[in-house]
Image (cartoon, rainbow, N blue to C red):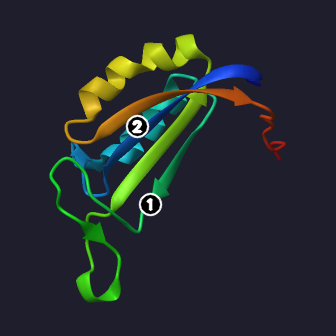
Amino acid sequence: MTRLTGTALRVTIFIGECDQWHHRPVFTEIVHRAHEAGLAGASVFRGVEGFGASSLIHTARLLSLSDDLPVAVVIVDAEERIRAFLPQLDELVEEGLVILDDCEVIRYVGREKS
């Protein structure tokens, strides 16, 4: 089991829900590649409204439903492991925003496998 405590690096990738990589959602490809790379974990969060570099507003409000809502993929691990993963994001993220933040891991505990 991966141990992760103390100083870490968080990478957050903001993309569109409809962004594709070889007929697969980009967020799914990022999560699967992070898993294959042995990173500590990855989570995908779907936004209800937002806009980015294109200045086009995407929203889930009833009167203006969007099929391309904003999505954030968050990955936290040791700095060297996150930095080693960045070239994969360069390959996958054609449109969007990738940011890095220093963070401190207080608790990282997984579920028991049954």
Residue type of the residue flagged with mark 1: Arg
Relative to 53, 50 lies left or right: right
Binning the other alpha carbons within 10 Å of mark 1 as few (below 14), some (14 to 19) or many (20 upward) gives: some
Label 2: state its secondary structure.
Answer: helix
* Quarter where residue 85 is shown: top left
Label 1: state its secondary structure.
Answer: strand
Q: Which residue position holds label 2?
A: 30
> Could you say which disc has been placed on residue 5 in the image?
none
Q: Image point 34% across, 23% down: which residue?
A: 88
Instruction: Determine the CA span between mark 1 and mark 2.
Output: 15 Å
Earlier sequence position, callout 1 versus callout 2: 2
The percent position of residue 108, horizontal first and vertical second, equals 77, 34
Image depth: mark 1 or mark 2 in front: 1
The percent position of residue 55, horizontal first and vertical second, equals 17, 56
- The quarter of the picture where the N terminus appears is top right
- Does the CB distance between marks 1 and 2 fall below 8 Å? no
Toward the bottom, the furthest residue is 63
Q: Which residue position holds label 1?
A: 46
The percent position of residue 27, horizontal first and vertical second, equals 38, 46
Relative to 49, 40 lies left or right: right
Is 87 above or below relative to 73? above
Is 63 above or below relative to 106? below
Q: Image point 17% across, 61% down: which residue?
A: 56
Q: Nearest the camera: 19 or 37?
A: 19
Is 112 above or below relative to 8? below
Residue type of the residue flagged with mark 2: Ile
